[in-house]
Image (cartoon, rainbow, N blue to C red):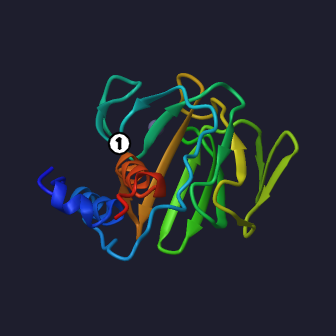
Amino acid sequence: MPWACSKASRLGLTGLALLALVASTPVALADQSWRQGVFPVARFLAYTSPFGGRIGPDGIQEHHGGLDIAAPLGSPILSWWGGVVESMFSDGRCGLGVLIRSGDYRHLYCHLAGQVSGRTYTSGRLRLVVGQPVRGGQLIGHVGMSGRSTGPHLHWAISHRGRWLDPAAILRAMARSRPSRQVRP
Ligand SMILES: [Zn+2]
């Protein structure tokens, strides 16, 4: 990473993170700060499949449009960013899914536990409705195995103006922009 020099780090890690993100995802993010971002799984176990080309569960080469995060069945799923619940799914791939819109970004959470009925998702006491505002870090679901899933995990995907981004690049930018890692004069 040519920008990870000591001189650049004195400028502050937030700027560095933005540079790194712009380098890995060709979208306009210069005015974006990632500190508000929340890691979407409360009981992380492992990253089980990255974004990009992969051999899928059927043994066929495919593009994987998100990041798979394994967690125990029923683990809380938290909204990555504040926004509005835009839609929800119940299909054979994503399974039960919730899509949240935050400005030009959309974030998708698949393979949830619970039920989707029309414009409402329920899981235990949790109830989400299309059009409902959510805060960053708010409980929006529980890890399940619905849809095309070989084990309990969250398929987490983020798009910007319709283009899918690598969520791992955004997680790295979030980590770099945390105040505790800022270089202070
Ligand atoms: Zn996935």
Q: Is mark 1 within 8 Å of ligand 1?
A: no
Q: Position of residue 48 (x, y in %)?
A: 43, 28
Q: Describe residue 99's horizontal placement relative to residue 19 as left or right.
A: right
Residue 140: percent from left, percent from top: 71, 50
In the rendered image, which quarter contains the C terminus?
bottom left
User: What's the amino acid at mark 1?
Assistant: Phe
Q: Vertical placement of 83 versus 128: above or below?
A: below
Looking at the image, residue 156 sits to the left or right of residue 28; the answer is right
Judged left or right of residue 137, residue 123 is right
Residue projecting furthest to the left: 2
**Picture coordinates of residue 112 (x, y %)?**
66, 39
State the image quarter where residue 173 is shown: bottom left
Q: Residue at x 27, y 61 (%)?
A: 16
Q: Residues within 10 Å of mark 1 (few under 14, many from 20)?
A: some
**Viewer-nearest residue: 112 or 16:** 16
Residue underneath mark 1: 51
Callout 1: SS: loop
Residue furthest to the right? 125
